[in-house]
């Protein structure tokens, strides 16, 4: 925000007054940013609804079928017209139906979390927000990770030396830390038909949801997924897994530091850990939101670089980075 604007807000706007709007020409006292933020939930609703519909119909037809909703996307800059030509932001142009469903679930989860936090009284020392969210939030958040599971199986596993061969052997094992509703575990079991996947989580309620999700899934894959109520910080297995998925942003900083050496010991020699990480946000608003949500959800504020450093300090080698989308999560792989 320009300095002159900030000074105007702080020094010139009368304090504790309610502007009168007797005339239709009265200026709106709110800043442009405040107006944008107030409209943002509806812009998100338009974006999410369009992404959901585009999973089952061509995007141009979806945009044409909902002109008012599309007008909101145009005002937000996600859809641009030049005569008859229409250009859309890449966020709307999802690759396939499965990716669209994962993206929609992720954004619904974030939106519902924000609503829950806005409607809840926040007190110091309160339980992490995951304990307070309803089942729909947990399901949406968990189902969004199916896309990560597919990316792990189809893009990361083949790129890591020796891993695809290891996971093709009978008896190969994968550990899914913070399994949630087991969507990532199920995606791995589906794509890698020889592996046994163990999913651990510290929330009994989310594991109950995971059990229901597995019961409704293809038994050929679901039958190779085992769920355990367990904290990765107490993991005691040694040389038991060929691949470990470690979602760093969902663990507290203390839990992450405790988990990394235990994951190292739990891997078989030559096995790989793949850690989901968030790059350091460049925009100050993104930095502030990331820090707040990490605190609310009991998660980690560690960024990609710090997670990579912790892996190396624990004895991992051959660390590699795999970006996802611009500004989005970065997967960090390292070998025992």
Image: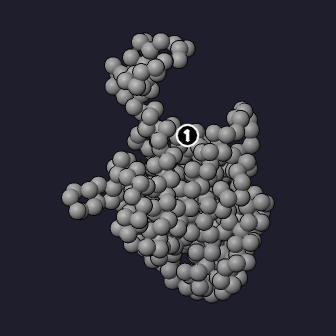
Identify the residue at image location x=27%, y=61%: 86
Answer above or below: position of 232 versus 28.
below
Q: In which quarter of the image is residue 120?
A: top right
Per the image, the residue denoted by label 1 is: 291
Residue 85 is left or right of residue 224, and the answer is left
Identify the residue at image location x=67%, y=59%: 136
Identify the residue at image location x=62%, y=61%: 140
Along the line of sight, the residue nearer the viewer: 86 or 107? 86
Residue extending farthest to the left is: 83
Where does the image place residue 229, in percent across and percent down from the top left? Answer: 77, 63
Residue 70 is left or right of residue 37, and the answer is left
Label 1 residue SS: helix
Along the line of sight, the residue nearer the viewer: 310 or 183? 183
The N terminus, quarter of image: top left
Q: Residues within 10 Å of mark 1 (few under 14, many from 20)?
A: some
Where does the image place residue 293, in percent across and percent down from the top left? Answer: 59, 43
Identify the residue at image location x=51%, y=83%: 165
Residue 80 is left or right of residue 271, and the answer is left
Where does the image place residue 2, in percent across and percent down from the top left? Answer: 33, 25
Answer above or below: position of 7 versus 243.
above
Q: Quadrant of residue 193?
A: bottom right
Along the line of sight, the residue nearer the viewer: 335 or 333? 333
Residue 328 visible from this viewpoint: yes
Residue 93 visible from this viewpoint: no
Answer above or below: position of 18 versus 81.
above
The C terminus, quarter of image: bottom right
Along the line of sight, the residue nearer the viewer: 285 or 232? 285
Answer above or below: position of 56 versus 22.
below
Where does the image place residue 183, in percent across and percent down from the top left? Answer: 62, 69
């Amino acid at each position: 925000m320009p300095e002159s604007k900030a000074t105007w807000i702080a020094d010139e706007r009368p304090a504790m007054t309610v502007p009168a709007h007797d005339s239709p020409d009265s200026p709106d006292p709110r800043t442009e940013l405040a107006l944008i933020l107030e409209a943002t939930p509806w812009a998100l609703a338009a974006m999410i609804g369009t992404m959901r519909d585009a999973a089952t119909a061509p995007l141009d037809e979806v945009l044409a079928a909902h002109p008012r909703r599309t007008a909101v996307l145009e005002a937000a800059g996600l859809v641009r017209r030049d005569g008859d030509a229409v250009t859309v932001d890449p966020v709307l142009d999802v690759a396939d139906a499965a990716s669209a469903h994962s993206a929609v679930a992720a954004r619904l989860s974030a939106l519902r979390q924000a609503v829950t936090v806005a409607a809840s009284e926040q007190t110091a020392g309160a339980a992490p927000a995951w304990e307070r969210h309803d089942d729909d939030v947990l399901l949406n958040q968990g189902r969004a990770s199916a896309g990560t599971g597919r990316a792990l199986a189809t893009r990361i596993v083949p790129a890591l030396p020796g891993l695809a061969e290891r996971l093709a052997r009978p008896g190969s094992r994968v550990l899914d830390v913070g399994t949630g509703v087991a969507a990532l575990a199920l995606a791995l079991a589906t794509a890698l038909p020889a592996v046994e996947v163990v999913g651990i989580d510290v929330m009994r309620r989310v594991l109950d949801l995971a059990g229901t999700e597995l019961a409704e899934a293809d038994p050929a894959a679901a039958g190779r997924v085992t769920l355990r109520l367990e904290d990765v910080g107490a993991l005691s297995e040694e040389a038991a897994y060929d691949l470990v998925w470690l979602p760093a942003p969902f663990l507290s900083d203390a839990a992450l530091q405790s988990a990394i050496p235990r994951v190292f010991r739990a891997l078989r020699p030559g096995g790989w850990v793949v850690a989901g990480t968030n790059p350091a946000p460049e925009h100050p608003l993104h930095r502030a939101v990331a820090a707040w949500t990490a605190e609310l959800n009991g998660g980690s504020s560690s960024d990609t670089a710090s997670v990579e450093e912790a892996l190396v300090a624990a004895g991992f080698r051959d660390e590699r980075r795999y970006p996802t989308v611009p500004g989005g999560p970065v997967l960090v792989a390292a070998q025992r």
